[in-house]
Image: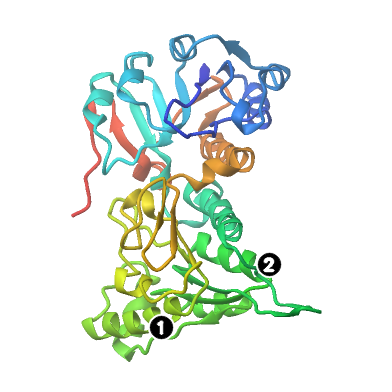
Amino acid sequence: MQIGIPAEITAGETRVAATPETVKKYVSLGYKVVVQSGAGVASSCIDKAYEEAGASIAATAADTYRDSDFVLKVVAPAAEEVSLLKQGATVLAAFAPHANPNLDAYAARGLICVAMELIPRITRAQSSDILSSQANVAGYKAVLIAANEYQRMFPMLMTAAGTVKPARVVVLGVGVAGLQAIATAKRLGAIVEASDLRPAAKEQVESLGGKWLDVPMSDEEKAKALGTGGYAWQPSPEYIRDQAVIVDKAVSNADIVITTAQIPGRKAPVLVKADTVAKMKPGSIIVDMAVGTGGNVEGSKPDENVITANGVKIVGISNIPALAAAETSALYARNLLNFLQPQHDKESKSIKLNKDDDMVKPTIIVDGGQVIYKKPN
């Protein structure tokens, strides 16, 4: 059985879906691995390292795809790649199925498409969770981006010329990326405040040294939030109004704002209104980590820096993980390996996806000529 690792063709995508570390493991399991020449260069993985791990190097994408039964990618195959894929091949990637226009083309090719971002939130699937692994690095990198753009210091300094005040950082959305952003900003010496819909996040924020932006919540709302883990409950209009007031005050006084709220399959929620941005100090920085899915900040633009009339810079980078490709590729490649290893059949030395497995089933969006993904309402 052959596994193919093509170079990514999406603009700005520097990651690769397998590293020499994971290729060595695939080869030890009995698979032939073919890597397109140069596929890992931007991730600090050179062709020689792949060859030493046991892979063959293919000159072109067509040579990589032609005989590969399994294809590992970061981004779903583009329209021009579909015809290169082996009929009936299995492809693992981040497919963004809610917005992917090529699902019917995949089905026509007889592909089995495994959308890795749909890995369920169950304990044994954690090691395959690409959203968490990539968000962890992105949260760290977002703070460094903000620090680089910010024309002042993060920590408090006592100098002969006077005292330098610490930066005030507000993090909106306390998932994996948000928690890493809080930890990183604290390590740089900033004062950090954070907000999230999940009451349980309060303890996590405070454990990292951040201040929780508390929004009054009724007993009924607390029960709803705790009952769903905080991810699926619908806040009352009163809660939304109270939250907006607290966020407006905190963001207005902030030097740095990091927004992280994204909902798989849906447009990102708007957390920061233009009126709030207009109250911020000149030189303040906002990093909208959700800009690629609609944005958390009014006025943010994908892959652009927007300077507002009052001198606030809104940084919109659609693919922050690609800015730390060596690390994010290593993590992503291990996620795929962890997903596939339990599907390895020792006798036939092949991968046999158990489509009834509660870790595998939710990820399959196209199966042998049929699109089975259903868009959320």
Up-down relation of residue 206 to residue 119 (above or below)? below
| Residue at left offset 35%, top offset 51% | 301
Amino acid type at mark 1 = Lys
Q: Residues within 10 Å of mark 2 (few under 14, many from 20)?
A: some
Up-down relation of residue 327 to residue 274 (above or below)? above
Q: Position of residue 241 (x, y in %)?
A: 27, 83
Tell me the tag on residue 188. Answer: 2
Q: Residues within 10 Å of mark 1 (few under 14, many from 20)?
A: few
Q: Which of marks 2 and 1 is nearer the N terminus?
A: 2
Up-down relation of residue 306 to residue 58 (above or below)? below
Q: How far apart are marks 2 and 1 (CA)?
A: 23 Å
Q: Where is residue 313 in the image (x, y as percent from the top left)?
A: 45, 60
Instruction: Return the residue at label 1.
Output: 249
Amino acid type at mark 2 = Leu
Left or right for 259, reference 240: right
Q: Position of residue 174 (x, y in %)?
A: 48, 68
Q: Which quadrant would residue 91 be assigned to in this image?
A: top left
Q: Which of 366 and 171 is in front in this view?
A: 171
Q: Which of 171 and 174 is in front in this view?
A: 171
Left or right for 101, reference 7: left
Q: Residue furthest right?
A: 160
Left or right for 245, reference 348: left
